[in-house]
Image (cartoon, grey):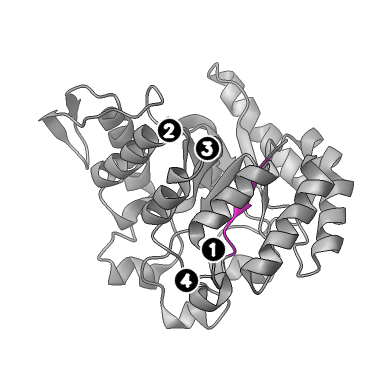
Amino acid sequence: MQYNLLMPMRATKHYDRWIGDEHLTDVARLAEEAGFDGVSVPEHPMPADSWLATGGHHCFDPFVALSFMGAVTSRVKLITYVLVSAYRHPYVTAKALGSLDTLSDGRVIAGMAAGYLKPEFEVLDADWDERGARFDAALDAMRAAWSGETVDIDGPFAAHGHTQLPAPAQPGGPPVWIGGNSGAARRRAALLADGWMPIGQPPEMAEITGTPALETIERLGALIAEGNARRAEIGRGPLDVCVAPFGNQPDVGAYAKLVRDDLAAYEDAGVTWCTIEPQVRSFAEFRDAVHRFADELIT
């Protein structure tokens, strides 16, 4: 099992107060020193107030935040958790991810999704109705750009006689992990990508995100097995699966114990990455929580 430390989603709104005398770079240093394998940040460039009022959250720009984090670390993976493909042109996204991968010596993992917040699509002038089909095409376009060779593709992102350099440090570009629980997301992960980032959520949250509920390790395991079977049919190996264990709570000790007790079950289900997001009110509490998780899970 590998461990990803997610910058707490509720920290950004009150960042100055939350971080105190420290800096975002200290989050990355702490993760690496504690033995985590990755650090990650989410994306919401222009969330609607109506969504924020029902549990939504603000975010730093992921490329800016991960660049700061990558500059002060040497080992941890830099994970977008997750980018929404339609929010920017795929060649612009490819350039940003490829640049970050080159400058971090190949440490980027591109977590991406089709997106579920229609008001955010609208304010960004992004295509809501065709987001699924355009996401598939965007993945092809990005990989073509990451080749470092002259691009020659048709479709929504047609390009003929264009080249994007420098190429990413990882041959062919960063691994792509697909977020979401829908059939389309699982198909995309199994057939077009390298990993899957399911969302553990009850039915009430599923109504907001528009992606199916997922509440048990047993159900998670069944979906992973289904995805890996589809991959085997086309001669590809098992998915990387990155999930935040069910039952997150502000009591760090209780949650760490819950994760530790269920760890073997997650591994048996096919989970390869475990995302930890401490629900804390300050960086000082965050530091304590990270060390607690490291003691319970990593060391």
Residue drawn at point x = 25 percent, y = 49 percent? 89
Rendered image: mark on residue 210: 1
Q: Amino acid at mark 1?
A: Gly
Mark 1 or mark 3, earlier in chain: 3
Q: Are marks 3 and 4 in contact (CB under 8 Å)?
A: no
Rendered image: mark on residue 189: 3
Spatial CA span between label 4 and label 2:
25 Å
Mark 2 or mark 3, earlier in chain: 2
Q: Main secondary structure of the magenta part?
A: strand
Mark 4 or mark 2, earlier in chain: 4
Q: Which residue is mark 4?
A: 58
Q: Amino acid at mark 4?
A: His
Residue 107 on image: x %, y %: 47, 35
Mark 1 or mark 2, earlier in chain: 2
Q: Are marks 4 and 2 in contact (CB under 8 Å)?
A: no
Nearest to viewer (mark 1 / mark 2): 2
Nearest to viewer (mark 4 / mark 1): 4
283 or 52: nearer the viewer: 283
Q: Amino acid at mark 3?
A: Ala
Mark 3 or mark 4, earlier in chain: 4
Q: Quadrant of residue 226?
A: top right
Spatial CA span between label 1 and label 3:
18 Å
Does residue 130 appear anywhere in the picture? no
Q: Are marks 1 and 2 in contact (CB under 8 Å)?
A: no
Seen in the picture, residue 225 relative to 217 is either above or below; the reply is: above
Seen in the picture, residue 299 relative to 150 is either above or below; the reply is: below
Spatial CA span between label 2 and label 3:
14 Å
Residue drawn at point x = 20 percent, y = 32 percent? 164
Q: Are marks 1 and 3 in contact (CB under 8 Å)?
A: no
Q: Which residue is mark 2?
A: 174
Does residue 177 appear anywhere in the picture? yes
Q: Which residues are magenta?
A: 3-8
